[in-house]
Amino acid sequence: MLGDTAPGGAAGGLVAPSSRQTDPDPGWLQLNIDSELQAIFLELTAAAPEYMSDALLDELIDADARIRRLAAIGRVTRRRELAYMVMSAQRDSTFSLGGDLKLFRDCVSTGNYDALTSYARRACDLIWSMVTGVGGARLTTIGLVRGEAFGGGFEAALATHLLVAERGATFAFPESLFGLYPGMGAEHLITCRTNAALAAQMITDSRIWTAEQLFERGIVDVVVPTGEGRAYVENWMTTSTSREHGRLRERFASVTLRSLYDTVDRWVEQAMTLDRKHVRAMSYIIQAQDRRSAVTATAHGNTLAKVRVPAIAGRE
């Protein structure tokens, strides 16, 4: 878990002898503050699961709470306030492969409605935090995507105010392969970025989208050359205006936590009706996730494209 000590051991402030500070015990997450940029960088480390496991979800909830505390410290001490939060992953090949499908499968197989609802609502809490600037801390949130962002990983990226993708990044909602749809906010978030018709199409379509294709549709805000995402984000922080920040946040004004929970409740109800063939299809994707987690960081490839799901139609 992330600790509660202020970066660099400085109690009660964000500014320490160095402008760049690193959490001393990152585990699956690394939390860095750049006081000159007034930014906090939240990175999934190479050791983290490539999908949103139940345990990783707990880590992210802890990190979210800590970022809120750090933002509050900045205001109280009248130091340079945090203004930005950047979410990314250290692996070049994967941002996130999506939700905890093992948990989904087990909950569906055993009829454990409460456990599935708990996971999904906690995921929505994080989506809501990103949309509202880390729980109302008024930070501008930035998603920096390299590699694959599928399912819940795609939803997490969509929840950031500014979505930056490097060339070669790919996005998909594989949920329709096993009889579901992305239930943690995707439809709301795509609608806010584009329109309801495109949102309705995308949440039932398991195709793989490139960063460029989503940029053309207004879903990805910026596409940058491979390897240049961090530099672009840092430059944007120093050149963007408060009016631009407000415009990025305002487009999500219609999203409420209640609307996210309502979608989740419907999603859980549908999940509990999945039949054996859908559960079997989910197992094929779990196997693909497991295989991907076992390969080395230098072995790149498109996980979803390699999945073969017998008896389930509709994938393009």
Image (cartoon, rainbow, N blue to C red):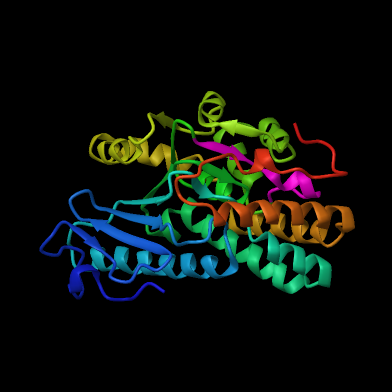
245 lies left or right of 253: left
28 lies left or right of 6: right
Task: Give the residue at x 68% y 49%.
Answer: 182
Magenta stretch contains residue 176: yes
Magenta segment: 169-182
Q: Is residue 155 visible?
A: yes
Report x, y in % for residue 120: 65, 62
- The residue at the far left in this view is 17
Foreground: 226 or 187? 226
Which part of the image, by quadrant, shows the C terminus?
top right
Q: Quadrant of residue 116?
A: bottom right
Q: Quadrant of residue 196?
A: top right
Task: Give the residue at x 72% y 47%.
Answer: 175
Q: Quadrant of residue 199?
A: top right
Task: Give the residue at x 75% y 39%.
Answer: 204
28 lies left or right of 313: left
Foreground: 225 or 32? 225
Report x, y in % for residue 46: 43, 57
Task: Give the residue at x 77% y 70%.
Answer: 113
- The residue at the far top in this view is 216
Magenta stretch contains residue 163: no
Report x, y in % for residue 150: 60, 45
Looking at the rendered structure, the number of numbered marks drawn on it comes to 0
179 lies left or right of 96: right
Which part of the image, by quadrant, shows the N terminus?
bottom left
Report x, y in % for residue 162: 42, 40
Foreground: 85 or 251? 85
Where is 282 relative to 142, above or below?
A: below
